[in-house]
Image (tube, rainbow, N blue to C red):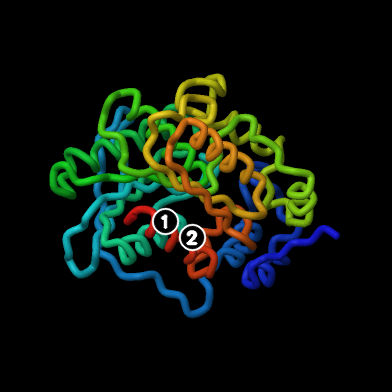
Amino acid sequence: MTELTLDPVLAARLPQLVGLAPLGAGMPTPDEMARFASFSAPVDGYAAPEADVSSRTAPGPHGEVPVRVYRPADGQASPFGFVWAHGGAFMFGDLDMPEADVVARELVARTGATVVSVDYRLCHGGVHFPVPHDDVHAAFGWAAGASRLLPDGAPWALGGASAGGNLAAGVAQRLRDEGSAVPSALVLAYPVVHDPVPLGSPQLQAQLDLLPIVLRFLPASTAHLNRNYLGDNDSDVRYAFPARGRVDGLPRTLVLVCEYDDLRPSGEAMADALRTAQVPVTVELVEGVTHGHLNIPGLPPALRSIAGIAAFLTS
C-alpha cells in the first residue's frame, strides 16, 4: 500500500494546501498566499539565532546586486565565508524568506562563518537567463574579493536551494572555467539542475501523487518554469542547467534531497555525475519532508539539514 510518512508538523499542516493551484499556474490569490504562509509558519517556540546583519550591494553586469551580510553576533572573526542563494522557481523569493534569512542566521550561529545572502533578479518583466546567474556570479566574486569581509585568502563556499542550487552549481562551473577562485565547497539543497527534470521511480511517483498538487513539480510545471528562466536560450546553453554541462573540477559537494519531491531525481542524478567525475560528494536524503523544507523555521528535519550543512562546511 502506497503511503507517506511525513514529519508530524508537515502532516498536520498538509490539509491547508488541498485545492491550491500548482506553482507557476499564475499569481496566487491573497487567500492562497495566506494558506501557504500558514503551512510555512515557524514551528511554535522557535526563534532564529541573533546575528550581526547589514545590507550591502555588489557590482554586477546588470546593475547593483543587493546582498545581506550575516556575521557572528559576538563579533568574533569568521573562519570562512559562504555565499547563499534562496530558491523560488526563478520567479519568487527574497532575502526575508526563511530559506534565505533563517538558514543564514542558523549557519552563522553554528559555524561562525560570514554568510552573504544574494537577492538575485527574478524572472519577471523580461528578465531571463543569464541575469540571475550573472547576479550570483557577481555576488560571489565581490564577497571573495573586493568586499574585504574576510582576510585575503580566506575560503569562500557557495550554495543554494532549489533554483538557487541551480545558480550555485552553474556559477561554480563558470568560476572553474574562468580559472577564478573556485569555491572551497558547494552546497546544493534540493536543486533543479536538469531540463527536462528526470522522473523518479514508480514507487516515488505513487507517493508523490498523494501530495496536494501545489507541492508538486509536474513535468508541465517544470517545463513552464524552466522555459521562463531560459527565455530565448536553449536548455543546453552553458551554465543554465548545470547537469547538462561538465561537472569535473568542481569542489567537494553536499547534495540534500527531500524524500517526497519531484526534484529529488535531479539532485540524485547530479550527485551520480559528480561521483563519476571523481568529485567528492556527500548525499543526504532528508526523510519525511517535501520540497522546500528549509523554508519552515524550526521544522525539526530542517534544523537537522542545517546542522548537516554546517558540519559539511566546517569539516
In the rendered image, residue 105, in percent from the top left (x then y), is placed at 35, 63
Instruction: Give the image quarter of residue 155.
Output: top left
- Left or right: residue 183 versus residue 3 is left
In the rendered image, residue 21, in percent from the top left (x then y), is placed at 71, 50
Q: Residues within 10 Å of mark 1 (few under 14, many from 20)?
A: many
When the figure is inspected, residue 281 is found, relative to residue 240, above or below; the finding is below
In the rendered image, residue 125, in percent from the top left (x then y), is placed at 50, 33
Indicate the secondary structure of the residue bearing disc 2.
helix
Q: Looking at the picture, which amino acid does disc 1 mark? A: Ile
- Decide: marks 1, 2 in contact (CB < 8 A)? yes
Q: Looking at the picture, which amino acid does disc 2 mark? A: Ser
- Left or right: residue 233 versus residue 210 is left
The answer, for residue 126, to whether it is visible in the render is no
Name the residue at 79% across, 61% down: 3
User: Any mark on residue 309, and which?
Assistant: 1
Out of 193 and 283, give the one closest to the viewer.
283
Kindly identify which residue carries mark 2. Answer: 305
Q: Quadrant of the N terminus?
A: bottom right
Name the residue at 46% across, 39% down: 122
**Mark 1 to mark 2: distance in Å?**
6 Å
